[in-house]
Amino acid sequence: MVQLSERPGTQKITNLQQKFTYEVGAMYDSENRFLEAMQMMCQCCQNNQLKSLMETHIRETEQQIQNLEQVFKILGQEPQRVNCDSAAGLVSDGQKLMLLAADNPKILDLALTGAQAKVENLEIACYRGMIKVAEQMNQNQVVQLLQQNLQQEEQTAQKIEQCMPQLLQEAKSAGGSTSGKSR
Ligand SMILES: [Fe+2]
């Protein structure tokens, strides 16, 4: 069970505005974690199409972080990261898989793509939820900023899906053990 006392800066949430601010903080934390992870992943990937997709999304994520800072400003708050366990978990799972797949570049590329697909889908779910709340609060400017971010995540998720068949094919022909022995 999570103890609130273990989360400095986390206060009880008693209304929609506080819940929304919490979610913006968690998204701000997630985007920063994902930016750092993508910068590392981008250095490891071999496939040019994947690399350029990552580079584009790194630039977009930098802009998304600025958009979230703008959202904080509109809400009259200082930008504050709220630890997001799901983002931390996705990054750590992705890094573990990358280490395990490090000996085969084609499998590594596929692992990176799968990890990034999970990240994009988490972000899409979060932004969609946040936009619904911002609409309820009549925060039109906030809605616009979050929609910009959502659109980029949706486009990235789509591009990843388009890359996947080729990466999968390459991974299949990349050889390595097919003995199916479990570890
Ligand atoms: Fe993203």
Image (spheres, helix red, strand yellow):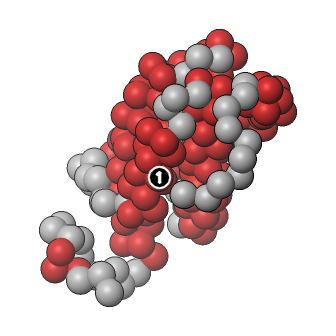
Q: Is residue 22 above or below residue 172?
A: below
**Label 1: few (<14), some or many (≥20) within 10 Å?**
few
Query: Badge 1 is on which residue?
Result: 93
- Horizontal placement of 46 versus 168: left or right? left
Name the residue nearer the viewer: 45 or 7: 45
Residue 152: x percent and y percent? 64, 35
Q: Is residue 41 above or below residue 124?
A: above
Residue 96: x percent and y percent? 44, 47
Q: Split into 4 quadrants, where in the image is the N terminus? A: bottom left
- Horizontal placement of 35 versus 140: left or right? left
Residue 163: x percent and y percent? 77, 28
Residue 13: x percent and y percent? 34, 80
Q: Amino acid at mark 1?
A: Asp
Residue 32 placement: quadrant = top left
* Residue at (54, 37) in percent of width and height: 101
Q: Is residue 168 above or below residue 80?
A: above
Q: Split into 4 quadrants, where in the image is the C terminus? A: bottom right
- Count of number-bearing discs: 1
Mark 1: secondary structure: helix
Q: Is mark 1 within 8 Å of ligand 1?
A: no
* Residue at (18, 67) in percent of width and height: 9
Residue 48 placement: quadrant = top right
Q: Is residue 122 above or below residue 166?
A: below
* Residue at (57, 66) in percent of width and height: 133
Name the residue nearer the viewer: 158 or 48: 48
Name the residue nearer the viewer: 139 or 91: 91
The answer to whether any part of residue 114 appears in the image is yes
- Horizontal placement of 32 versus 54: left or right? left
The answer to whether any part of residue 28 appears in the image is no
* Residue at (67, 32) in percent of width and height: 176
